[in-house]
Amino acid sequence: MSAPLRLSAAQARRVALVAQGFRDPRPAVPTMRTFSRTLERTGVLQVDSVNVLARAHYVPLYSRMGPYDTSLLHRAAERRPRRVVEYWAHVQALMPVELWPHMQHRMAAYRARNGKWGNDGVTPELVDSLLAEIADRGASTARDLDDGLPRTKDHWGWNWSVTRRALDALFAGGVVAVAGRNSAFEIRYDLPERVLPAEVLATPTPSPAEAHRELVRRAARSYGVATEPDLRDYYRMHHAESRPAVASLVEDGELVEAEVEGWGAPAYVHRDVAERGLPRRVGARALVSPFDPVVWRRERTERLFGFHYRIEIYVPADKRRHGYYVLPFLLGDRPVARVDLKADRAAGVLRVPAAYAEDHAQGSAQAETAHELAAELWQLAGWLGLDHVVVGERGDLAAALAAAVGRGQ
């Protein structure tokens, strides 16, 4: 057995960022080819309903491609030939359509247990009725199909009817697919044969072991360098699925074992990453969504960047440390700041209630951080159709950032 690949902390950071597409050049006008390349890097785009800045699935594309026409994503997700489809690939996420066969084992498990969240009150007669109605009328929301059944609030933030629970179980089981979402962000359900390309549906279902290998393989390419629990989390696998897959890929030479400075746990890189050689520099400048793959596994974010990060949406306002919707600011090969952001669409303002510099970006480095962050905020505001950037007073970077934002007007 060959010796593990040895990576310094800085090399690991750069490998991870290159794998995620942060060294790819931003084109003047992103195209569908740019979109496809970016999706290949991230693997999936997490979907979330929070819209204080922009929907979660739009921002990772912006972080890598720069200002882009969001119709690219709508075309890929809602028009033929569809390139992406929603499923429980990480959590609810847009994934490449070619992963549909590899999710069949997951779908079968959800069918066996009648969905992901339970289906109290869902009867076979209701299911048959819903499927017949969808087949007849085409893509429909739960509201379209709901006959006024009582709703409950058994789960925080949810107000689901029995119809909605039935549709969610059918979605988890792959019996229906997501054709898109309406302007209210409600899912439009349809039959898989009217959503997925025919060649995808005709693809033979791989064995569970083959599917698990493919998911780990993709996770390794997207992460660049990762531990087995990291790889497992990318597509939300169970350790009984991921561990044999990792061992098999190592045995076949597709995964290369690695030792990363300060990690204290075995790591792996994909063979393609190892063969490309270790990047010497990454010159990224990007605001990163809380739902971005580069930061969504918080333990890995700390190992990789020394960056302690938590989303505080669900924390009471008086207990928040940094703000409601806080984005890390990536400069070079590590986060140098974090900013609380809000798109005030009615006023046409990108609001920055708080801005904080990381410890390594204090002192003389703070002026550069503020300058680069201000430029990125103006660009973000333009992409969101906002005319102004207003910086609040909270945080040790706020004053310098406000001055830099003012100079950028």
Image (tube, helix red, strand yellow):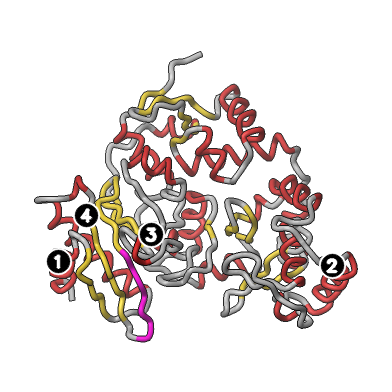
How far across and how far down the image is residue 165, in percent? 73, 66
Residue at the extreme left of the image, as rendered: 364
User: Do the residues bearing badges 2 and 4 touch, measured as CB atoms within 8 Å?
Assistant: no
Rounded to the nearest whole Å, what is the CA distance between mark 3 and mark 1? 25 Å
Q: SS of the residue at dot 2?
A: helix
Q: Which sits earlier in the primary sequence, circle 4 or circle 1? A: 4
Tell me the magenta residue range. Answer: 340-346
Front: mark 2 or 3 = 2
Rounded to the nearest whole Å, what is the CA distance between mark 4 and mark 3? 19 Å
- Kindly identify the amino acid type of the residue bearing the numbered disc 4: Ala
Q: SS of the residue at dot 1?
A: helix
> Can residue 326 be seen?
yes
Residue where numbered disc 4 is placed: 357
Classify 10 Å Cα crowding around label 1: few (below 14), some (14-19), many (20 and above): some
User: Left or right of 396: which side holds 176?
Assistant: right
User: Do the residues bearing badges 4 and 1 touch, measured as CB atoms within 8 Å?
Assistant: no
Residue where numbered disc 3 is placed: 63
User: Do the residues bearing badges 3 and 1 touch, measured as CB atoms within 8 Å?
Assistant: no
Rounded to the nearest whole Å, what is the CA distance between mark 1 and mark 2? 58 Å
User: Do the residues bearing badges 4 and 3 touch, measured as CB atoms within 8 Å?
Assistant: no
Residue where numbered disc 2 is placed: 127
- Kindly identify the amino acid type of the residue bearing the numbered disc 2: Val
How far across and how far down the image is residue 398, in percent? 19, 65
Rounded to the nearest whole Å, what is the CA distance between mark 2 and mark 3? 41 Å
Q: Which sits earlier in the primary sequence, circle 3 or circle 1? A: 3
- Kindly identify the amino acid type of the residue bearing the numbered disc 1: Ala
Residue at the extreme right of the image, as rendered: 125
Q: Is residue 23 above or below residue 400?
A: above
